[in-house]
Image (spheres, rainbow, N blue to C red):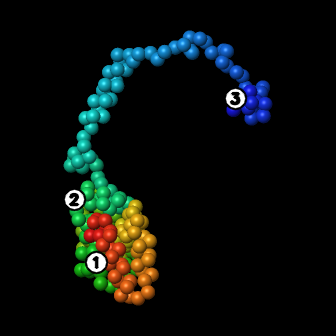
C-alpha cells in the first residue's frame, strides 16, 4: 500500500502523519558511508585477533573452566565428550543398586528430593559421588530416582523418537513370541550409544 491509500482507508489519522520526503536535507540523502577511522580499524583488528585466539573447548575443559553437563544433554554427544561407552551416572547407580538396592519398589518409590539433587549436582560437576555414604544407603530410592531423572531428561529418549512407531507396533504384536522377535528387531536398529 502507498501512504496515501493508507490515509484514505483510515489506517492512520491524516492529522497525525507528516510527510518528510521534502524536509530531509540533501546532505543526508547524498551522504556516503565514512571510511573506518584508524582508531576503529585497530579495534576491529583486535576483536578479530581475540576471536581467533580463543582457547579450544578441550583446553577449557582441561583447565576446569568448562564443564560438560550430564543431565539434559544428548546421549551421543555426552558420550563423545566424556569418552565413555555408557554414562558414568548410570554405571555408578546401577552398580550401587545391584549391590545394595534389592528391595521392593527400587524404581517405583521416590527418594528424598534433596538427596536426588545433591547426587545430580555432583554428577553434573563431573564428580563421582560416594554412594556408600550413610545418607544414600539409608535412602536407596534416591539412586533409583536419579536414574529415572537421567532418562527422563534426555532430549531424545533412550528408545528414540525416530523408532517410536516401530516400538509401538512391536509391543502390540499378537503373541509373546512374535512380540519378542519384533522388539528384538527394533532394538537392533537403535543408534550405538542408545543400544549400549
Image location of residue 11, percent across then percent down = 74, 35
- In contact (CB < 8 Å): disc 2 and disc 3: no
Residue shown at 30% from the left, 72% from the top: 188
- The residue tagged 3 is 2
- The residue tagged 1 is 97
- How far apart are the alpha carbons under marks 3 and 1? 73 Å
Between 54 and 27, the residue placed more toward the observer is 27
Q: Quadrant of the N terminus?
A: top right
- For the question of whether residue 112 can be seen, the reply is no
- The residue tagged 2 is 83
Helix, strand or loop status at disc 3 = loop
Drawn side of residue 93 relative to residue 170, left or right: left
Quarter of the image holding residue 29? top right
Drawn side of residue 25 relative to residue 194, left or right: right
Image location of residue 58, percent across then percent down = 23, 48
- Please rate how many residues cluster around mark 2, counting C-alpha atoms within 10 Å: few if below 14, some from 14 to 19, many from 20: few
Helix, strand or loop status at disc 1 = helix
- With respect to residue 58, does 148 lie above or below? below
- In contact (CB < 8 Å): disc 3 and disc 1: no
- How far apart are the alpha carbons under marks 2 and 3? 62 Å
Closest to the camera, between mark 2 and mark 1, is 2
Image location of residue 185, percent across then percent down = 33, 76
Closest to the camera, between mark 3 and mark 1, is 3
Residue shown at 25% from the left, 43% from the top: 56
Drawn side of residue 25 relative to residue 69, left or right: right
- In contact (CB < 8 Å): disc 2 and disc 1: no
- Please rate how many residues cluster around mark 3, counting C-alpha atoms within 10 Å: few if below 14, some from 14 to 19, many from 20: few
- With respect to residue 38, does 50 lie above or below? below
Q: Quadrant of the C terminus?
A: bottom left
Residue shown at 52% from the left, 14% from the top: 31
Quarter of the image holding residue 102? bottom left
Looking at the image, is mark 3 or mark 1 earlier in the sequence? Answer: 3
Amino acid at each position: 500500500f502507498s501512504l496515501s491509500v493508507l490515509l484514505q482507508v483510515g489506517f492512520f489519522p491524516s492529522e497525525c502523519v507528516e510527510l518528510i520526503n521534502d524536509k530531509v536535507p540533501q546532505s543526508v540523502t547524498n551522504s556516503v558511508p565514512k571510511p573506518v577511522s584508524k582508531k576503529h580499524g585497530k579495534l576491529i583488528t583486535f576483536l578479530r585477533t581475540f576471536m581467533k585466539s580463543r582457547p579450544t573447548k578441550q583446553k577449557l575443559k582441561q583447565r576446569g573452566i568448562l564443564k560438560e553437563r550430564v543431565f539434559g544433554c544428548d546421549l551421543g554427544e555426552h558420550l563423545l565428550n566424556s569418552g565413555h561407552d555408557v554414562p558414568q551416572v548410570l554405571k555408578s547407580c546401577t552398580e550401587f543398586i545391584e549391590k545394595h538396592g534389592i528391595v521392593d519398589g527400587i524404581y517405583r518409590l521416590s527418594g528424598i528430593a534433596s538427596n536426588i539433587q545433591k547426587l545430580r549436582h555432583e554428577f553434573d560437576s563431573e564428580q563421582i559421588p560416594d554412594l556408600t555414604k550413610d545418607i544414600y544407603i539409608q535412602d536407596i530410592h534416591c539412586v533409583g530416582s536419579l536414574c529415572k531423572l537421567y532418562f527422563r531428561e534426555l532430549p531424545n529418549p533412550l528408545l528414540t523418537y525416530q523408532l517410536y512407531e516401530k516400538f509401538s507396533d512391536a509391543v502390540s504384536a499378537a503373541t509373546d513370541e512374535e512380540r519378542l522377535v519384533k522388539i528384538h528387531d527394533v532394538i537392533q536398529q537403535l543408534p550405538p550409544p542408545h543400544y549400549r
